[in-house]
């Protein structure tokens, strides 16, 4: 099943980079505000919160954008090579992205990151498939309505 609500492949990369940056910026702001609160001296809580958010949230957003851009570029490349869009592209893209982003850490860390990226994307795709299958069976207009009690005499009571 194809997702027609997304942009076509070359434009999807920019869309995913922007979405990933936004998620990283918001999530990083929340995370770093807790860190700023925890390490704040007495009387300087607000100053510490704002300083942590301003200095570190943008970096988190850029890191998310780098991951999202690389993932989307690899995903589009796999779609072009395989000529079909299925969950295997996303799983392979997650594994390749995890491995390529850890390439400077050596082969062991690179392999571990690749496996972790593939497993995380497999879990995300699995949950997506299960929920779409579950949602499609919730309301099937072709099925007749079923009642608990088929006997009409029970309904008169």
Image (cartoon, grey):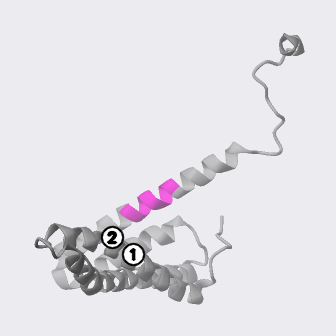
Quarter occupied by residue 147: top right
Closer to us: 2 or 67 = 67
Rendering coords of residue 54 (x, y %): 29, 85
- Disc 1, SS: helix
From which residue to which does the magenta span run?
120-127
Magenta region's main secondary structure?
A: helix
Q: Residue at x 36, y 82 (%)?
A: 61
**Residue behind mark 2:** 30
Q: Quadrant of the N terminus?
A: bottom right
Q: Residue at x 59, y 84 (%)?
A: 9
- Is residue 69 part of the magenta span, yes or no? no
Q: Which mark is residue 26?
A: 1
Quarter occupied by residue 5: bottom right
Rendering coords of residue 21 (x, y %): 42, 82
Q: Specify few, some or many for label 2: CA neighbours under 10 Å numbering under 14, 14-19, or 20 or more.
A: some
- Disc 2, SS: helix
């Amino acid at each position: 099943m194809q997702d027609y609500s997304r942009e076509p492949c070359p434009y999807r990369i920019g869309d995913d980079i922007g979405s990933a940056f936004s998620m990283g910026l918001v999530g990083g702001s929340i995370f770093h505000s807790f860190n700023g609160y925890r390490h704040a001296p007495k009387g300087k809580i607000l100053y510490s919160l704002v300083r942590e958010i301003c200095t570190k949230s943008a970096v988190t957003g850029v890191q998310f954008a780098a991951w999202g851009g690389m993932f989307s570029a690899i995903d589009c490349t796999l779609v072009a090579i395989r000529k079909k869009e299925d969950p295997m592209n996303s799983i392979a893209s997650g594994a390749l992205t995890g491995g390529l982003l850890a390439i400077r850490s050596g082969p062991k860390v690179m392999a571990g990151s690749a496996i972790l990226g593939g497993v995380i994307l497999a879990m995300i795709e699995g949950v997506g498939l299960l929920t779409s299958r579950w949602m499609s069976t919730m309301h099937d207009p072709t099925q007749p309505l079923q009642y608990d009690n088929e006997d009409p005499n029970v309904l008169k009571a």
